[in-house]
Image: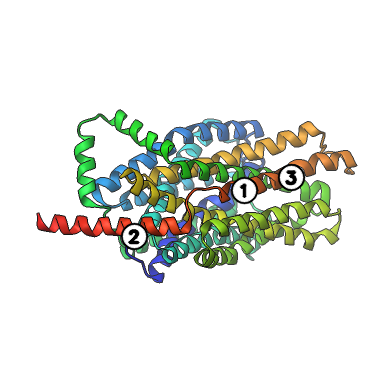
Amino acid sequence: MNQNTTSQNIIYALPFFSYSLLITGPMAVMPGLYVKYFGLSIGAIALAKLLARLFDGITDPLIGYASDRYQHRYGTRKPLIIVGGVLLLLIGAMLYIPYGWEAQYSQSLSFSYFLFFYLAFTLSWTLMKVPLLAWGADLSSDVQGRSQRFSFSAIAISSAPVMFFVIPFFPVFESTEVTPETLKVVVYVSVVLMPLFLFVCMRSVPDPPRYPELLRKQVAEEVQEINRWDRFKKVVRLVIANKPLLVFYLAYGLAGLGNSMSSGLTFFFVDNYLGIAEKLPYAFIMSFGVSVPASWFWGVLAKKIGAKSTWCIGLFLCSIGLAGICFLEPGEAALWPYLVCNGLIGGGYMSCFVAGFMVLSNIADYGKWKFGQDCSGLYFAFAGTMIKFNLSVGIAVGLLLTDWLGFDPEAKAVSSASRAALFIPYSVLPTILLILATIVISRIPLSTRQHADIGRRLDAETRVAAVSIAKQ
């Protein structure tokens, strides 16, 4: 496949910044803001998140499948990305600036309003993200191009929340507390950036070379003989038959579950154990800030030693950071050691979004070669569903384990038993899960050399198909 220029790979990453600005930072504080300012209960928000994950389990694969079908027929995914981005912006505005709500009246927001726009928001996010990631996998199969694209994308994703958490420090605000006014600023900035970045990206980055046209015609002739439901079942069977893909999902799920379990307990660790709650913003800024250079580093390393090895190293560093937390003692003196551990966790986990997505792209190439059908959108859709699932289930499991083991957030002093109840789900179990994920990654049956050979075969098929069509 063709190799894109560095400038095109940078431009390709711009929409990732615009959607991450609307999602990553705001979603981290949204539950607290909706409880404190909008009058919803914790139970209502938990129910909405559960329903959203069930909704995602149905809609994400369908969007991935539709993205692949659209690519097969028209040779592009751009219209889906544009529609998803516009909807994400419009619905995000309604979610973060609720219609008719005024802070001074102190009225509660209805659960039905929040649930509707939250579900629509996650649907729009998927509609933009899945085709965007699949497009990045399709653009080229060379290691340098893919490492650049996913490095720049990860940098964009991790730098956006840094901008979000810096907003309260602007002199126009009376305090550094995150409030609904912070969400308003994010929406206003996104109104400018989302359309601008989408326009520049869609205009400057080309569509990928159309995967062998002769094979596309054969697939088109074949699918005319079966109905849509049978066609969808056939694609699902192709996913199940892809052994490297199933091993990838196992590794991705273990890593995501461990990271989410730990992240959901960050507030309790910093506030109840370390006793430095006022330093919590620094922890977020450190984590996301380190992720920016780490994303670049993982891309460079992947070109030298391969995506699988890079991913393993990243998760190993993440597990070191998690394990190091066990040695911290309460008090102000723990701030810098904790920030170092948090930096290792955040920076190491970014390997999932650089090297991990490179591995998934390589597996998508394997699927094209092995089964003769492009399912990149569906592959990334399932990965996206796992991300959302882990964020909800991992946090819930961590909280439930902490409570079951006997941690008391109301206690003035943390006893040894309460410390163990916090440390097991916050540090010990996530470390074990990440180590298991590293082992599973090493077992993915697709090496760098094998992928390079597959890429050459796909390129040869593309050239032969183009020559054959030109003679017709």
Up-down relation of residue 210 to residue 227 (above or below): below
Circle on res. 426:
3
Most foreground residue, 41 or 333: 333
Local packing at callout 2 (Cα closer than 10 Å; few below 14, some 14-19, many 20+) is some
Kind of residue at disc 1: Ile
Q: Can you give x and y, in whole percent of width and height, for residue 186 in the image?
A: 53, 56
Colour setup of the view: rainbow
Q: Position of residue 179 (x, y in %)?
A: 63, 51
Q: Nearer the viewer, mark 2 or mark 3?
A: 2
First along the sequence among labels 1 and 3: 3
The C terminus, quarter of image: bottom left
User: On the rendered structure, is 320 left or right of 447?
Assistant: right
* Vertical position of residue 202 compared to residue 32: above or below: below
Which quadrant is the N terminus positioned in?
A: bottom left
Name the residue furthest left. Answer: 472
The tag earlier along the polypeptide, 2 or 1, is 1
- Residue in view at x 19 percent, y 45 percent: 217
Residue 275 visible, this orientation: no
Q: Bin the neighbour count of mark 3 within 10 Å (Cα to Cα): few under 14, some 14-19, many 20 and up.
A: many
For the image, the number of numbered tags is 3
Give the spatial CA distance, label 2 vs label 1. Answer: 29 Å
Mark identifier at residue 439 = 1
